[in-house]
Amino acid sequence: MPHFKALSLSLPELPCTLSCKENEFSFLELYSSCVFKNYSLLHTTSKISNLKPKEFFLTLKQNDKNAKEFLVKCDKSSKIAPIEIAKNALMLLASNQKVITHNLNQQNITPQFKLPFIKEINDFLNFEELLQKEGLENKEIWLEIGFGSGRQLLFNAQNHKDILHIGIEIHLPSLEQVARQIGLLQLNNILILAYDARIFLELLPKCSLSKIFVHFPVPWDKKPHRRIFSNAFLTQCARVLKKEGNLHLRTDSYEYFLYSLDLAKEFKNFEISHQKNQQNSITSKYEARWNRLNKDIYDLYLLQKEPLNIATKHYDFSFPKITSSPLLTPSFKKQKFVKEDYFLSLEDLLINPKGDKKILKISFGDFAYPETRYIIIDENLKYFREPPLKTEANFKAHNLLCSLLKEC
């Protein structure tokens, strides 16, 4: 994570706006933790030309053993892509400090070069509007989950230019490297984002995809609950795939292959076929490694015979009007509430110097796919940047939080 260490720390008077290269940064407000000593969040926004502003936090931590030493870094729970944006913000702050060490070395590729291709989950909440805005409506759509080095994603985009290719990858360095390649190759038929694909599928309209690729996913043999293939995942695939659409799993794990095959047999809408050691037009980095080791490769194909018709649920993540609550005072204490199928953890409360603005940090939702979010508290309560993903577990946790705030 981008950071610098400094002897003492002198912040500009807030709020303030500073410029760095093509970036304009606004450092808005400092919030101090009620739980962790000498820990703060600096609310920061970035604007690049006519692109959508980015909003995130920087963390400031004073060394417990040496009060003169500070660590300033990009906050993990609000991190953004491309990471160069956060690096530029940190460089601005570091320029007037006595820096001990840092990892803010700049790359030749600017954030502007990568930004058009990297999307955020909020962009997909209105999928049709996104496609229209990007000039990609009425295109056939392929989705690749966990594209890694991007070899297949880029190969498909270059060889199928009339198709929109969406790539999902949670490893940010891989995401940014592929964004760089998209720009260098001047491809305009790819959208990529860093997100959990299992939840991303829930946001897509039904019958919107023609192909889904899941190549060499982590087998998670010792933690099978973390596998991307599950009953819920296949249910969503069956909903978003068009008739005659195809889901393709490629793996070197025979155990994972058998596990996925057994899952697929429970779905009558899928026509199942499989092959062993089939040669593809493009070889991924992982596949090249397994080929050198003479490992077997297994392919599982699920052809959609008839899409599943699943009713879409609507969730309201707004907050009631709350004038005050003992939960939101400087005496805040961490609490965790564990229910049968979800949880809610109150992690921290951070308060600005005047005491009129606060940030509540929470973790919540499904045990296997938890979320960490910030809630901005001033006259009203609202989630930072965007509401949580519209899942049943998240909605239950949100309602529990609302109840706790009103009861106190």
Image (cartoon, rainbow, N blue to C red):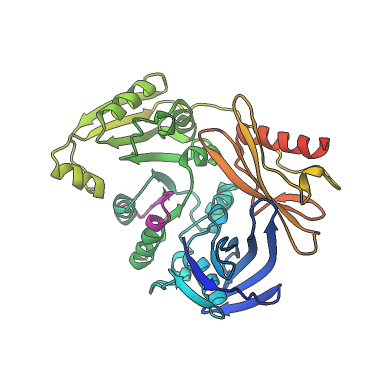
Q: Position of residue 108 (x, y in %)?
A: 38, 74
Q: Position of residue 124 (x, y in %)?
A: 55, 49
Percent x, y for residue 15?
71, 72
Indicate left or right for 314 with 241 as reference.
Answer: right
Q: Position of residue 388 (x, y in %)?
A: 62, 44
Give the residue drawn at x 51%, y 74%.
Answer: 91
Residue 408 shows in this picture: yes
Q: Is residue 237 above or below residue 47?
A: above
Name the outermost residue toward the front. Answer: 65
Q: Residue 32: which quarter of the image?
A: bottom right
> Which is more toward the observer, 152 or 88?
88
Name the residue rendered at 21%, 35% in the picture. Answer: 297
| Residue sitting nearer the eye, 262 or 377 | 377
> Magenta segment: does it hold 169?
yes
- The stretch in magenta equals 159-175
Q: In this rendering, does residue 23 appear at all?
A: no
Looking at the rendering, which quadrant does residue 238 occupy? top left
Residue 305 or residue 192, whichever sits in front: 192
Q: Residue at x 53, y 75 (%)?
A: 94
Which quadrant: the C terminus? top right
- Horizontally, residue 225 falls left or right of residue 365, namely left
